[in-house]
Image (cartoon, rainbow, N blue to C red):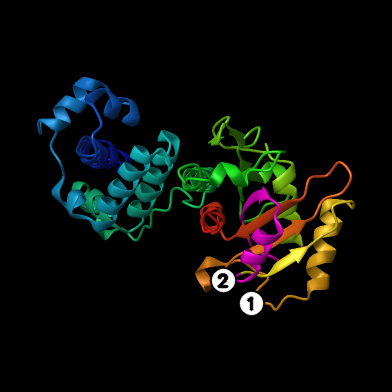
Amino acid sequence: MKFIEEVVVDEFLPTVRSMLAEDLRERGFTQREVADALGISQSAVSKYAHGDVARHERIVADARVRELVDRIGEGLAAGDVTPVAALVEIEVLIRQLEEGDLLAELHEEAMPALSAADVEFAVHDPDSGLRDRERVLASVRRGLRTLTNASGFAGLIPNVGANVVECLDDAATVDDVAAVPGRLVDVKGRAMVPGEPEFGVSEHVATVLLAAREAGSTARGAVNVRYDAETVERLAASYPTVKFDPERATEEAVAEAIAAADLPAADLPADRDEGRGGLVLYQTGAVGVEPIVYVLAPTAVDAAQIVRELL
């Protein structure tokens, strides 16, 4: 008797770890860095590097496995993907390949009696909340890098600080929005990032994003920048632009402003899959309230790219 989990442990994981170790080494990782990234020992990395661990050729040849290894290797090297996110992505592919696919076939070869049985294996749900959260966090990291690597971005940071945010598809509260804790600040002409993105740490930009979504936008990403009439004018040339009242509750002010703007259905949502762009919200300030521009888009990366075009 051989369980499909044994096929995963004995065939799939050694092959994928070997492929990932090779990929990371080619990207310039040291043996220690590869070991830390994959959560394995340096001696194991050495064995992978010297071909002492056998690879299953059918797994190596699978296009989905190769694409996953390349995507995870690139993400780990760039810092966009954490070991937890990599683990989740590999787990998802494993569960997919277990369901009448490659791993199921290898399992049947190891247990011929299974091929005659009318049984489907659907052990795990790939649409996990953890996977969604890790994807959002990775998107915020990429958005941050898009901006912090751009010369001149610090000049767009408001006195209250800037943030890069993205929410889950079913976001209802600020706890469903990932952002930088403490906001980005301008330190001697450089944008300083105080910490790794987290969920539930943005009250300000997250509230604007959620209010816009409540009013009908499907945008999930947002970046706030310093208000300037020229900035708004430049953005308005390419994106629907709506002014709201900073002296009212944000939720009400944004909702009423969007409703009053009477935007066409094609302009209001920000859905990259349907080719729709961003939405710009802004307020011109009040007593004790700094004027701010908010750029909304399908993802944090998209919002960051729109802001970068201003530089």
Which of the labelled discs sits on residue 266, or is there none? 1
Quadrant in which the N terminus is drawn: top left
Task: Tell me which corner region of the image, top left, top right, bottom left or bottom right, holds residue 120.
Answer: bottom left
Which amino acid type is marked by label 2?
A: Arg
Q: Position of residue 187 (x, y in %)?
A: 58, 31
Q: Is residue 224 magenta?
A: yes
Residue 51 position (above or below residue 31): below
Mark 2 Cα shell of 10 Å, populated few (<14), some (14-19), many (≥20): some
- Range drawn in magenta: 215-238
Q: Residue at x 20, y 27 (%)?
A: 45
Q: Secondary structure at mark 2?
A: loop
130 and 140: which one is in front?
140
Q: Is residue 29 visible?
A: yes
Q: Position of residue 91 (x, y in %)?
A: 39, 43
Identify the residue under disc 2. 276
Q: Secondary structure at mark 1?
A: loop
- Horizontally, is 262 left or right of 305 in the view? right
